Image (cartoon, rainbow, N blue to C red):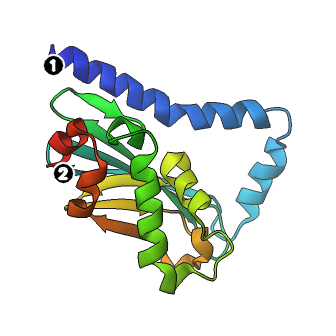
Amino acid sequence: TTKENLDELNEQLRQIMIAPIREQEASNAENVDYDAAEKAVQESPLGNETTSVSYETAFQGNARTLFIQSFWYGGGAHGSNGLSAYLIDDTQMKLIRQLDEISAAPGEFVSFAADYFLEHYADKYAGQDDWNKDYLIKGMNGDAAWYFANDRFCLEFCEYALGACYAEGRPCLEIPLAECLPHLSDYGKQLLQ
């Protein structure tokens, strides 16, 4: 039923959201000096840290993108923020985890998108150390947020990625959906149109 699918989807999203926290807790548990960290926060000019999380959704065809934005400020010049994006098939209540799930052939869509970005964004990023096809493919395979919204495919990086300064925000590379369609499977086309 739809409710069971929705419950399963909610559980998948919950597991995705808590996995990095569990990994960090496991790797840092023995190495963190919690007393020193607490003292540093208390002695900061602001007295403590600020954390916020917000959620938004965007629609593209039969797909919904759930955006989870986080912000953390612990003192200093500025805080840090992150973005996670989850593509959901609204007809099947299914989470699309990898672009290959909607690609015409494994690796075809990410290869096309990386080539497109290299050609269309060269003026802005060509001088950066990490401006290459492997870096962009790595971003689409999990190191950056990717999503479909407003008739576009978007690949969004964190601050400082691609050599961008903090003030620039999160660099977002876009491709018009019409140019993506030839590289999508029939399922991907039905989902996004």
Query: What residue is shown with label 1?
Result: 2
Task: Residue 77: name its quadrant.
Answer: bottom right
For the point 34% across and 42% down, the residue is 103
Q: Which mark is residue 132?
A: none
The front one of 38 and 138 is: 138
Percent x, y of residue 111: 46, 55
In percent of width and height, residue 185 lies at 27, 40
Residue 170 appears in the figure: no
- Indicate whether 27 appears above or below 79: above
In-image side of 192 versus 75 (left or right): left
Q: Nearer the viewer, residue 78 or 161?
A: 161
Q: Is residue 52 above or below residue 101?
A: below
Depth-wise, is mark 1 or mark 2 nearer the camera? 2
| Residue 114 falls left or right of residue 175 | right
Q: In this orientation, does residue 135 appear?
A: yes
Residue type at tag 2: Gln
Per the image, the residue denoted by label 2 is 60
